[in-house]
């Protein structure tokens, strides 16, 4: 029904009511007729738009050389064959760029869904694995209910899972499947505080990854092809068991922030100078109270900032973790720094506390510090006087 005719009916009903020409029943009936007509008109408009949307979606699939069924149905069949249901809803939040997660799982790329299902299967996760997350209560942990996810244009661009109840909804894992290599549009992967001891080689194929956070796992090595993360800007590897870094590490040419704190590393890659975009490097090791005492009661002695006389006190957040001498790997520390650090022209912060750098007679010797630590080439050098000297 044309909108103009609908408005005339409603207006007529209102006039009849206002003038009292007819009975109350007549006005009521006229209003009900108008509402029914409006409902029919809205349904027709919705059906028309839905048809147009499906037509556009099919056209988009055709442009990529796929039919809608060819991309979706295999994903459903494969998920079902693996014993996992195809998710139809989720209680987790997504950002404004993502599609609504309350619809069919067919709205999401099946490659990404398969990865999520793999994580669930390999780690034997259930709805009971986290007491912090709300789900649909059907007794089965579905792919879209795992951790925190952000989707954009049907692809997974951010994934966080771990015991943290706030950022990752409490789903801790101990293994990361090879299918992580399917996430070619992923930009953020946050697996902090899990129990991972190794990472799949396929991780190096995530060419769009910008942030990789692996704080406090049990990693003993990194994939040999980690240098394939060509767009990586932030890498957090603190509090693991890494004793060396692969040669390809220096291929991370876009890396800006590198956190290696609390790892039993004793040397850095010889070609470190290739990380020419690096701005923050954290090599802090656990320290004992004695090391802090040897730095003096004035915390200004614990850091050097461009040799300025007005050096501020060392911020608490930047100080090394307080750990005891029984900490595993305590004896494995840096005793020297590669001269390649002097070539990192963009480096703004260098954290060195808790190592065994430039020691003599039981304490660090400022006279032995290399010039690039004293001449202001690196504006902020923290913890240089807080060393574990033998």
Image (spheres, helix red, strand yellow):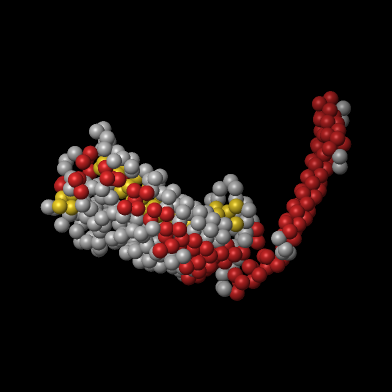
Q: Going by the image, does 31 lie left or right of 380?
A: right
Q: In x, y percent, where is residue 317?
A: 31, 45
Considering only vertical position in the picture, is 143 above or below 354?
Answer: below
Residue at (58, 54) in percent of width and height: 151
Seen as rendered, the residue at the extreme bottom is 81
Q: Quick one: quadrant of the C terminus?
A: bottom left
Q: In x, y percent, where is residue 273?
A: 39, 53
Seen as rendered, the residue at the extreme top is 19
How many numbered discs sit on the rendered protein? 0
Q: In x, y percent, where is residue 99?
A: 62, 52
Viewer-proximal residue among 314 and 224: 224
Residue at (38, 48) in percent of width and height: 344
Q: In x, y percent, where is residue 274?
A: 42, 54
Using the rendered view, name the quadrant where residue 216 is placed: bottom left
Viewer-proximal residue among 389 and 145: 389
Q: Quick one: quadrant of the N terminus?
A: top right
Using the rendered view, name the quadrant where residue 36 is placed: top right
Considering only vertical position in the picture, is 197 above or below 21?
Answer: below
Residue at (87, 36) in percent of width and height: 5
Residue at (47, 51) in percent of width and height: 254
Considering only vertical position in the picture, is 176 above or below 275?
Answer: below
Q: Going by the image, does 388 lie left or right of 22?
A: left
Seen as rendered, the residue at the extreme left is 361
Viewer-proximal residue among 282 and 46: 282
Quick check: can you spot residue 30?
Answer: no
Quick check: can you spot residue 206?
Answer: yes
């Amino acid at each position: 029904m044309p909108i103009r005719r609908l408005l005339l009916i409603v207006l007529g009903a209102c006039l009849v009511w206002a003038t009292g020409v007819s009975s109350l029943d007549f006005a009521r009936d006229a209003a009900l007729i108008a509402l029914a007509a409006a409902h029919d008109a809205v349904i027709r408009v919705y059906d028309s738009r839905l048809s147009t949307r499906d037509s556009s979606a099919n056209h988009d699939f055709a442009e990529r050389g796929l039919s809608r069924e060819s991309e979706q149905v295999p994903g459903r069949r494969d998920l079902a064959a693996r014993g996992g249901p195809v998710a139809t809803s989720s209680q987790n939040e997504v950002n404004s760029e993502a599609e609504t997660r309350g619809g069919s799982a067919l709205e999401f790329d099946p490659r990404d869904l398969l990865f999520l299902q793999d994580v669930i299967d390999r780690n034997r996760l259930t709805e009971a694995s986290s007491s912090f997350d709300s789900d649909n209560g059907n007794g089965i942990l579905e792919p879209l209910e795992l951790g925190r996810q952000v989707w954009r244009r049907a692809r997974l661009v951010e994934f966080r899972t771990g015991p943290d109840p706030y950022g990752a909804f409490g789903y801790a894992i101990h293994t990361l499947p090879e299918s992580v290599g399917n996430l070619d549009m992923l930009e953020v992967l946050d697996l902090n505080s899990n129990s991972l001891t190794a990472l799949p080689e396929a991780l190096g194929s995530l060419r769009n990854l910008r942030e990789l956070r692996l704080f406090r796992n049990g990693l003993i090595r990194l994939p040999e092809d980690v240098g394939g993360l060509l767009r990586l800007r932030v890498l957090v590897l603190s509090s693991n068991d890494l004793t060396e870094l692969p040669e390809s590490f220096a291929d991370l040419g876009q890396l800006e922030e590198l956190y290696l704190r609390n790892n039993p590393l004793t040397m850095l890659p010889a070609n470190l100078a290739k990380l020419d975009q690096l701005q923050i490097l954290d090599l802090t090791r656990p320290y004992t109270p004695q090391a802090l005492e040897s730095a003096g009661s004035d915390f200004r002695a614990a850091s050097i900032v461009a040799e300025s006389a007005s050096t501020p006190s060392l911020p608490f957040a930047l100080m090394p973790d307080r750990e005891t001498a029984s900490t595993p790997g305590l004896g494995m520390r840096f005793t020297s720094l590669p001269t390649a650090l002097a070539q990192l022209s963009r480096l703004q912060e260098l954290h060195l506390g808790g190592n065994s750098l430039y020691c003599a007679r039981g304490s660090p010797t400022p006279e032995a510090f290399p010039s690039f630590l004293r001449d202001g080439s690196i504006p902020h050098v923290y913890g240089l006087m807080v060393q574990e000297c033998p």
